[in-house]
Image: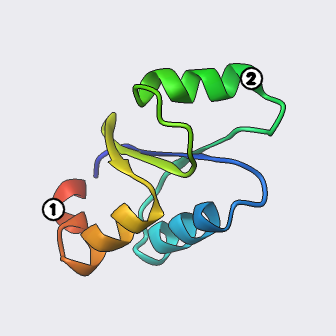
């Protein structure tokens, strides 16, 4: 299985949903929790995503999948398993 990284922030409902979806699918992932005052963390995330400022940001093998709605769409289309294989 490919490496999955999820950038999240505290009290983000879409972050919670993304993590729940991955857990339901038994997909191991690394969570990078960025606190509201963690400027270095936010900067790292923005650089990696070419300026995207929202969370969650979900990566599969360093490829940006998008946020929760993108992940859920891939899952409902049956494409998530393909990406993870």
Query: Residue 83, position in %: x, y?
Result: 20, 56
Query: Which one is closest to the eye, mark 2 or mark 1?
Result: 2
Q: Quadrant of the C terminus?
A: bottom left
Describe residue 81's horizontal placement relative to residue 47 as left or right: left
Colour theme: rainbow
The answer to whether residue 47 is above or below residue 55 is: above
Q: Which of the 4 quarters of the picture holds residue 77? A: bottom left
Query: How many angstroms separate mark 2 from mark 1 (CA)?
Result: 35 Å
How many numbered circles does the render carry?
2
- Disc 2 is placed on an element classified as helix
Label placed on residue 6: none
Against 55, is 11 above or below? below
Q: Secondary structure at mark 1?
A: helix
Return the residue found at the far right. 37
* Residue at image coords 30%, 72%: 73
Q: Nearer the viewer, residue 79 or 56?
A: 56
Q: Which residue is rendered at x = 78% and y = 28% of the image? A: 38
Q: Which mark is residue 82?
A: 1
Location of residue 17 (image quadrant): bottom right
Residue 13 x %, y %? 67, 68
Residue drawn 46% across the image and 67% down it: 22
The image shows residue 35 at horizontal and vertical percentages of: 79, 39
Write down the residue under mark 2: 39
Which residue is more in the foreground, 3 or 41? 41
């Amino acid at each position: 299985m490919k490496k999955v990284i999820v950038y999240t922030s505290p009290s983000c409902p879409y972050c919670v949903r993304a993590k729940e979806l991955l857990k339901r699918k038994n997909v191991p992932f690394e969570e990078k929790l960025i606190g509201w005052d963690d400027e270095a963390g936010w900067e790292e995330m923005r650089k990696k995503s070419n300026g995207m400022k929202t969370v969650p940001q979900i990566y599969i093998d360093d490829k940006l999948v998008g946020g929760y709605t993108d992940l859920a769409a891939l899952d409902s289309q049956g494409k998530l398993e393909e990406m993870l294989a």
